[in-house]
Amino acid sequence: MTESELLTRAQCQDIFGRVSHRAMAEGADQVELTLDVTASALTRFANNTIHQNVAEHHRSVSICVALDHRVARATTNRLDEESIGSAVRQAVEIARVQEPDPESLPMSEPAPQTEVERFCRSTAQATPADRARIVAQAIDHVRSQSQTAAGICATRHSVEAILNSRGVFAYYHDTQGQFSITAMAGDSSGWAKATAPDYRHLDAPGLTRRASRKAALSHDPGELPPGRYTVILEPPAVGDLVGQMFSDFSATSIRDQRSFLTGRLGKKLFGSGIHIADDVYHPLQTGAPFDGEGVPRRRLALVEDGVPREVPYSRRAAHHDGVPPTGHGFPLPNEYGEAPLNIAMAGGDVGLDEMIASTARGILVTRLWYIREVDPYEKIMTGMTRDGTFLIEDGRIVGGLRNFRFNQSLIELLNNVEALSPPERASGEESFDMVVPALKVHGFHFTEVTRF
């Protein structure tokens, strides 16, 4: 899918003109249009063979109308007049049968937008042959180690735009490449993954060597009894685990007393070295610099020196509390309110190798999966290690370990941090991409050994 085949700014304005004309003719007071167009392609491999190449063109035309304090939305994936007219009529009909909402607000007004450039033409124009070359090199290396490779190489090109009848026009255009690989041996496995706007920056050979090396090092895994251990969490594990708490950083969930931050804002909750921001403008982050209503995103200091400071506000939550919105709201109507989506956690200057060298006895964790919540207020999570769990003794990795299940409070975890690496963009499986360091923590609670 080439750049010209996605929606340009002029095309977005033309579509909005058609939507707005029909909505007003149907009796809507205000109308908002959200356009989301994505061209994605994926090359999947397993058993050292490419077995799937797919391409998908997704289009969402989402129309929100406001009518006498009633808000409703309808969506289509077609741009012809009949489909647009049908979606407008559906939205208006849904709005008319609702009870008026006295807390509904007029749609957002225009505000200065900060542009971010995350479009890479090479990614948008990547071909199946380009992806196949990357995968073939990875398979060749893994096969040379008498291992089996599986994973994906993917490219994506997307446009997101929000326009409304009060003059908002927010437009964002980006690309993303992704490479993920699992190297499997007889009784062990290793994994690595990365994403980047330019797929050529993924360093697939380096990721492949890392996954293969983990599979080799973790063969014939030993077993440790459950208990509390010093643990080094690599960045993907940090993102997957710590990322579970950020849906609670929400003014709406705090007001509804659904958040573990209820009654804790401004109080010391984590260790002094913990600094976490929500920052869509961070050079390692991606995503639109505006929210689901077209409000520009603001950088938030979520945690400073272990103290939760700022939380996101949608327009509705901000109006309720008499503060400015932060640009983190979801498209209306919704029941969630707002959430941070561009997490950037400050790191330190201790590299992963140095963390290992300084550990007399501990466990190195590559990544986690099947993460679920056990205690919402103490933020206790359970889950399992996967694809590279290692025993550290006297400052070196001495072998692989059978995987563990854990029950661990995130509050306790972030109070037990002994060292942080420089942050990097981490791409896990259980959370959105984040900028996080590796963490060395003490007292990590493993509850049982798994049998796979």
Image: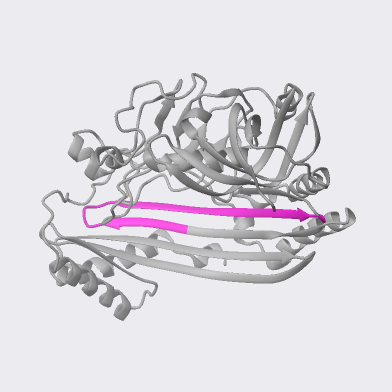
The span shown in magenta is 159-186
Q: Is residue 54 above or below residue 228?
A: below
Q: Position of residue 101 (x, y in %)?
A: 13, 54
**Is residue 312 in the magenta section?**
no
Q: Is residue 412 left or right of residue 290?
A: right
Q: Is residue 434 visible?
A: no
Q: Position of residue 5 (x, y in %)?
A: 51, 68
Q: Position of residue 390 (x, y in %)?
A: 74, 38
Q: Closest to the observer: 442 or 303? A: 442
The colour scheme applied to this rendered structure is one colour
**Residue shown at the point (69%, 37%) measured from the top left:** 225
Q: Is residue 22 above or below residue 171?
A: below
**Looking at the rendering, which quadrant does residue 70 occupy?**
bottom left
Q: Quadrant of the N terminus?
A: bottom right
Q: Is residue 37 visible?
A: yes
Q: How many marks?
A: 0
Task: Characterize the magenta stretch by its predominant secondary structure.
Answer: strand
Q: Is residue 222 above or below residue 333?
A: above
Q: Is residue 4 above or below residue 231?
A: below
**Residue shown at the point (37%, 62%) measured from the top left:** 12
**Is residue 180 in the magenta section?**
yes
Q: Is residue 100 left or right of residue 248?
A: left
